[in-house]
Amino acid sequence: MSNEQANRNDAKDKGRKRTREGGSQTDEEDCRQACGHYCSNATNSRLSSIEEKLNLLLSVFPELENYKSRINQLEEENKSLQTSLEYTQAEIEDLKTKTNDAVSQEQKINADQERINKEIKELQRRHIKLECHSLEAT
């Protein structure tokens, strides 16, 4: 039997894995078996630590809900502003188009006005020449 135990111990040493530093369920079970009183204190300590953390989370939870609702409000406001921006950009493009049309019409009117002014001056010269000829003929 002692030979068998030595073989088992050798096999355990070869296949042994690194143990955790923190504790595990098996560590707690070993601890309960070895010293029941110490383990219950450690368990109570852990439970109270977990309870404190849960209380902290529960106290922060309403604040998180407020942040969620504020984020939702801001997202809706952002959508509204995006829509408004799109409409404004469309209006700006429309105004640009109208301005370009007005400028081209103004240029056409100015060209027509220059042409008419030239024609008027030419007609005035002709009129003066005709008056001069008619005065000379009389």
Image: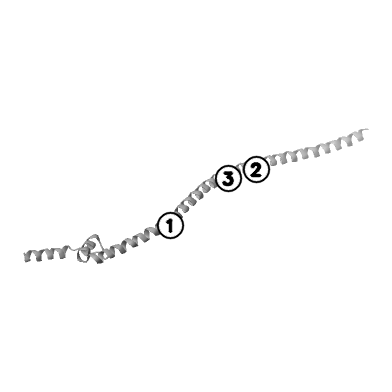
Crowdedness near tag 2: few (<14), some (14–19) or many (≥20) residues, C-alpha within 10 Å: few
| Mark toward the start of the polypeptide (2 vs 1) | 1
According to the picture, the residue beneath numbered tag 2 turns out to be 99
Using the rendered image of the protein, determine whether residue 57 is visible from the camera's viewpoint: yes
User: Taking 85 as reference, is 21 left or right?
Assistant: left
Using the rendered image of the protein, determine whether residue 22 is visible from the camera's viewpoint: no
Could you say which is closer to the camera, residue 55 or residue 13?
55
Task: Give the CA separation, mark 2 to mark 1.
Answer: 57 Å
In the rendered image, which quarter contains the C terminus?
top right
Task: Examine the rendered structure and indicate whether residue 54 appears above or below residue 137.
Answer: below
What x and y, as percent, mark residue 126?
83, 36
Residue at image point 56% right, 46% down: 85
What x and y, as percent, mark residue 2?
7, 66
Could you say which is closer to the camera, residue 96 or residue 90?
90
| Mark toward the start of the polypeptide (3 vs 2) | 3
Residue at image point 60% right, 44% down: 92
Task: Give the CA separation, mark 3 to mark 1.
Answer: 42 Å
Secondary element type, mark 2: helix
Residue at image point 11% right, 63% down: 8
Return the mark for residue 89.
3
Return the mark for residue 132.
none
What x and y, as percent, mark residue 71?
48, 51
Crowdedness near tag 1: few (<14), some (14–19) or many (≥20) residues, C-alpha within 10 Å: few
Residue lying farthest to the front in this orientation: 37
CB within 8 Å, label 2 to label 1: no
Task: Examine the rendered structure and indicate whether residue 101 appears above or below residue 29.
Answer: above
